[in-house]
Image: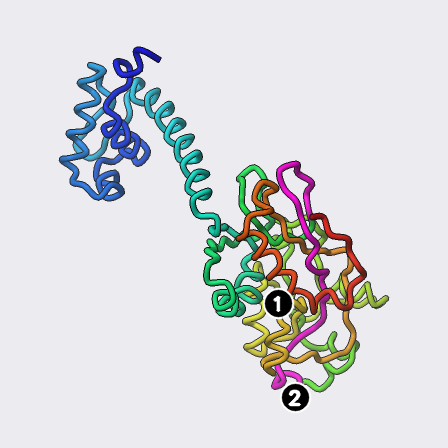
Amino acid sequence: MSNLKQLLPPLNALRTFEAAARHESFKAAAEELCVTQAAISRQVQTLEEFYSLKLFIRSNRKVELSPEGRGLYLAASAALQHIASASGTLLQRNRPGHISLTTTTSFSQLWLLPRLKQLRSQHPELQLQLISGEGNPDYNEGFDAAVTLGIQEHPLYVCEYLFSEEVFPVCTAEFARQNPQVATLNGLLQVPLLNLSADHWKARLWAPLDWAFWLRQLEMTADLNQTGMSFSHFLMLLDAVHEDIGVGLAWRHLVQRQLEEGKLVRPVRETYQADDRKHYFVCRRDRLDTPGMQTLKHWLLTQTAPLRESAPPEPGHF
């Protein structure tokens, strides 16, 4: 370590070089770092003089890394990412209420967002970063907390059962009025049935829950070749339902508020209680006892309590 000062290049120049190398563009690096292209060029030149090597191959319209530049970029990128990760951990320790919460897009927009105002009012100290996607988060990415469908055992994470799914048909009151046959299961088969496409389920741990599956749970078999549509996302399917295009399968936790507000109706009483399709609150074990995580956990448990009323008891994991 005694010769560290002699071996390390000017660190500001190295950071500038990393940005220019990553973009392979001095202009893009200048925009990222909020400086001029001339400043980027001077910093790169400083680094090239330090090594007495050309790190970029320059042409009229672009710059490319030289072999030596490529080697330095790989090392610099890995080192800066490692520093950023360690820095993020330290910053989180100084902001104990800051939590990233990962959920599916549908859960975020249809369940969480309508409750955010209440959460902010009750717990203004809680600082959330909301992240949404189409599947459960990757444990290797080191997320703080998540609401997941199913769980994957991992030594660094713990979980708590929130609710199981309940699935039933929905449509608008106007669609039901214009198509009174939807008041029976056989009548449903006479109107367009809206499905989530098979691609939607590829990111999930469970088998597709579509109309064919739902009807089988009610011991019904039917030819589903009537005119219908499929959608890659539940939010798109729900928009189609609101446009009176057909009847869609919906999840209670995602549409309960719209049912209460009269925006949607349940044309039939039949439902499928998917007790094995469980949703969990998952969080990092080392943050479980922090005030922010405890607040978030208890708030989610309170808010999802109605969804657990008709489900079998599930032991907690905390």
Question: Label 1 is placed on what type of residue?
Answer: Leu
Does 89 appear in magenta? no
Q: Place residue 242 in its image quadrant.
A: bottom right
SS for dot 2: helix
Q: Residue furthest top?
A: 3
Of residue 14 and residue 60, the one placed in the foreground of this image is 14
**Span highlighted in magenta in the image:** 151-177
Q: Which residue is mark 1?
A: 254
Residue 28 pos. (x, y %): 25, 41
**Badge 2: how crowded within 10 Å, few (<14), some, or many (20+)?**
few
Residue sitting at x 59%, y 43%: 284
Of residue 318 and residue 220, the one placed in the foreground of this image is 318
SS for dot 1: helix
The answer to whether 173 appears left or right of 221 in the picture is left
Residue 31 pos. (x, y %): 23, 44
Of residue 205 and residue 155, the one placed in the foreground of this image is 155
Residue sitting at x 43%, y 38%: 90
Residue sitting at x 30%, y 11%: 3
* Residue 177: assigned label: 2
